[in-house]
């Protein structure tokens, strides 16, 4: 069957979970492309204070970190199937975190650098995972070569961030002074600029390539997913708007996790409506996020540690835990429940 | 399947690991809420600001207590210019001017567009009577932010002292 025939029933955006507007704006990250420049504009900045931004971060970004944990422990059979990640990992994480806070001057910078070097890779992996998921559910078959190209396009923002970020990525491994030396700095600058251009050009190039080689265009939402992630890492940091990108990354994650949770619950026999199931799930995420990001660091000060290192390292460790848990909970190949939702 | 039912079906070793992590997390979080309530009569703030406690010490004129907080944040985020600038300011308030100079030199190297960092470095050098060295830093601060009142005042003062016209 040709790609075009297989995609009958899917709109140009792809076969959506809720509808094109919801999927493209929230899961695809399309809303962020429009909203972040507006939120970072001078008139908006005069209205948005630190409290409002913090509330948005808690509601979206912090809640999304908690969502992976809530999803892990609400997945039927998770404790039986994944004893390490459900039972061993939390203990290991708490022990490592405590050790890093206790020796924050020596271990802290490395834990912090690990989290924020890994973070853009996690964003890239999320864009890739969502893209392949939309291709699959839209009946758009990706050949191995197509998957490699898609993966490369999704990884470009990671490569950009790894090469350009201060104190993390490349600068974690190589002396920043050496990178800033007159012989190296221009080469690094040119490399970063080239990666920036490639990152922003990749969605259109990939779309054109897949359309010409497969005889049909991939779902448009794939281009939006790759483009929005590229903008988050390449364009928005220059406008000091990266905090908003993390909010929209959280929104993207929460939207898809709500869909999966509600559909799994309903498939398991729940009679509650989808929005109600999502709301209950979100309430748990919010409560856990508050405990993790806001109560836990002060708990460490009760043990006699400093507040600064407790906050910074708790945030870093929650990131790392989230990245590991995500490797398990979103598997489609060996998880019939996830596969059922993708195909539904 | 509820978490508790899942837990009942999990192997005993897993149950122990999970219970230990859960108890440790619950105790630490509860301690955080209790400490916040006892100290401030509020729940933990939703603003994630690693320098909140250090800043509070600075505001209370307890700079010596603030320095370790600022130093810890600067050590972890070692390539973050504003963190080095804040450490430099805290060290300066604590009277540790040589260390403040080092931190602020690092801050201007990491964040060359930060007018506050240039101004603070110039002011610290003025306090150390290194007037000719201070002037270019203060000039840079004013160049970056012409309305920077503190830098402008310090620059005028530095020029008077350099000319020998200062009282």
Image (spheres, coloured by chain):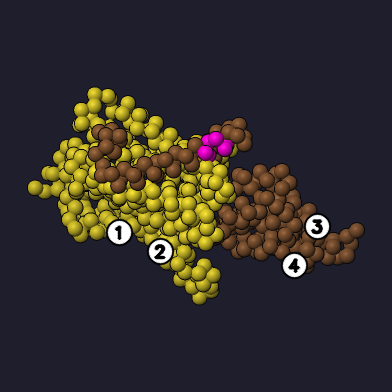
Q: Are marks 1 and 2 on the same chain?
A: yes
Task: Name which residue lies at 48% across and 55% down.
Answer: A99
Q: Which residue is mark 2?
A: A194
Q: Is residue A241 magenta?
A: no
Between the residue at mark 3 and the residue at mark 2, the CA separation in whole angstroms equals: 45 Å
> Tag 4, which chain?
B
Q: Is residue B35 magenta?
A: yes
Residues in magenta?
A: B31-36
By secondary structure, the bulk of the magenta-drawn segment is best described as helix
> Tag 3, which chain?
B
Q: Which residue is mark 4?
A: B133
Task: Name which residue lies at 44% across and 61% down.
Answer: A169
Q: How crowded is the residue under tag 3: few (<14 C-alpha within 10 Å), some, or many (20+)?
A: some
Give the side of residue A91 with respect to residue A135, left or right.
Answer: right
Q: Which residue is mark 3?
A: B156
Which is more N-terminal, label 2 or label 1? Answer: 1
Q: Colour of chain A?
A: yellow
Q: Are marks 1 and 3 on the same chain?
A: no
Give the side of residue A22 with respect to residue B120, left or right.
Answer: left
> Tag 2, which chain?
A
């Amino acid at each position: 069957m040709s790609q075009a025939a297989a995609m009958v029933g899917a709109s140009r955006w792809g076969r959506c979970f809720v509808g094109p507007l919801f999927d493209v704006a929230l899961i695809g990250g399309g809303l962020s492309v429009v909203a972040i420049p507006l939120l970072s504009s001078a008139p908006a900045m005069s209205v948005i204070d630190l409290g409002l931004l913090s509330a948005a971060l808690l509601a979206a970004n912090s809640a999304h970190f908690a969502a992976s944990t809530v999803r892990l422990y609400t997945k039927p059979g998770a404790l039986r199937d994944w004893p390490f990640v459900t039972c061993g990992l939390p203990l290991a994480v708490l022990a490592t975190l405590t050790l890093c806070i206790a020796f924050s001057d020596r271990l802290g910078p490395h834990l912090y650098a690990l989290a924020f070097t890994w973070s853009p890779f996690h964003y890239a992996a999320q864009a890739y995972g969502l893209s392949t998921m939309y291709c699959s559910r839209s009946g758009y078959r990706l050949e191995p070569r197509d998957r490699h190209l898609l993966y490369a396009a999704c990884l470009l923002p990671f490569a950009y961030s790894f090469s350009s970020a201060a104190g993390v990525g490349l600068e974690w491994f190589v002396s920043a002074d050496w990178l800033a030396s007159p012989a190296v700095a221009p080469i690094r600058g040119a490399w970063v600029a080239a990666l920036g251009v490639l990152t922003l050009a990749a969605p259109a190039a990939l779309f054109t390539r897949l359309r010409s080689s497969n005889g049909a265009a991939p779902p448009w939402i794939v281009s939006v997913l790759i483009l929005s992630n590229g903008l988050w890492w390449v364009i928005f940091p220059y406008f000091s708007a990266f905090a908003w990108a993390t909010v929209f990354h959280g929104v993207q994650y929460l939207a898809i996790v709500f869909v999966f949770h509600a559909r799994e619950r309903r498939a398991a026999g729940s009679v509650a409506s989808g929005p109600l199931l999502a709301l209950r799930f979100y309430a748990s995420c919010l409560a856990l996020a508050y405990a993790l990001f806001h109560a836990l660091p002060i708990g460490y000060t009760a043990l006699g540690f400093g507040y600064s290192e407790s906050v910074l390292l708790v945030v870093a460790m929650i990131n790392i835990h989230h990245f590991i848990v995500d490797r398990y909970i979103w598997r489609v190949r060996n998880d019939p429940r996830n596969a059922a939702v993708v195909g539904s | 399947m509820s978490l508790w039912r899942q837990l009942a079906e999990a192997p005993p070793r897993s149950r122990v690991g999970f219970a230990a992590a859960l108890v440790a997390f619950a105790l630490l979080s509860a301690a955080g809420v209790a400490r916040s309530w006892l100290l401030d009569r509020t729940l933990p703030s939703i603003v994630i600001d690693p320098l909140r406690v250090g800043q509070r010490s600075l505001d209370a004129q307890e700079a010596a207590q603030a320095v370790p907080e600022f130093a810890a944040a600067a050590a972890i985020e070692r390539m973050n210019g504003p963190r080095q600038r804040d450490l430099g300011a805290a060290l300066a308030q604590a009277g540790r001017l040589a260390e403040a100079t080092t931190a602020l030199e690092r801050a201007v190297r990491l964040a060359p567009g930060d007018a506050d960092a240039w101004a603070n470095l110039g002011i610290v050098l003025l306090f150390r009577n290194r007037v000719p060295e201070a002037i270019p830093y203060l000039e840079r601060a004013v160049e970056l932010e012409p309305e920077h009142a503190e830098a402008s005042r310090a620059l005028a003062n530095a020029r008077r002292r350099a000319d020998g016209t200062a009282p």
